[in-house]
Amino acid sequence: MSNKNDYEAGEIHEAAERIEEIREQKGFKFKKPWCEHIGFPLSSYQNYASKGKSAKKLTPSVELLEAVHAKYPEVSLHWIITGKGPREIRSDEDLERDNKAVQHLKDSAHQNLILSEQLMRKYIELQDRYEKCMAELEKTKQLQH
């Protein structure tokens, strides 16, 4: 049975490679038709599917995982994310594992949204402080002249 650590310590950075494997296995030689088929922007997909030494190794977005899973619900999200377990859902246990992977994705997306909001508030706070400091500095300069 899987647990949360599978998603944190697993081979999630290789999930993009597993998605590429699915693309090729489903007969899509080129990325553009694949992206049109799964309904995902090619420009975004290329960030995950780059190959070579200089390629970015980004973790696939929740949106990409959802797009693949919507077209191919038989492919296990747990396998895509972690590289563990069967590639396709074949039993109730596989389905339960996959449901946990989906829930983890939703929880992670929610947590990322909360963190993004917190970072934005902090940025605005720091920007306000900066502007106040600059105004005080300008007043100090004016008083010295």
Image (cartoon, rainbow, N blue to C red):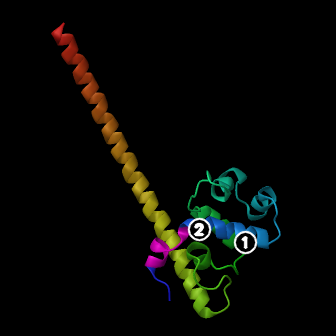
Q: Is residue 97 magenta?
A: no
Front-lying residue, 11 or 134: 11
Q: Mark 1 points at which residue?
A: 22
Q: Position of residue 20 (x, y in %)?
A: 70, 66
In the picture, the disc for residue 14 is 2
* Crowding at mark 1 (Cα within 10 Å: few <14, some 14-19, many 20+): some
Distance from label 1 to label 2 (Cα)? 13 Å
Q: Position of residue 18 (x, y in %)?
A: 66, 70
Residue drawn where x is 26% and y is 23% of the image = 135
- As drawn, 141 above or below 77: above
Q: Is residue 42 left or right of residue 56?
A: right
- As drawn, 117 above or below 23: above
Q: Magenta stretch?
A: 5-12
Q: In this view, does 66 lie to the left or right of 4?
A: right
In the picture, the disc for residue 131 is none
Q: Position of residue 43 (x, y in %)?
A: 69, 50
Residue drawn where x is 36% and y is 42% of the image = 123
Q: Position of residue 25 (x, y in %)?
A: 78, 73
Q: Give residue 73's quadrant in the image.
A: bottom right
* Crowding at mark 2 (Cα within 10 Å: few <14, some 14-19, many 20+): some
Q: What element carries label 1?
A: helix
Q: What element carries label 2?
A: helix
Residue at far left of view: 144
Q: Is residue 8 magenta?
A: yes
The type of residue carrying mark 1 is Ile
Which of labels 1 and 2 is toward the front?
2
- Mark 1 vs mark 2: which is more N-terminal? 2
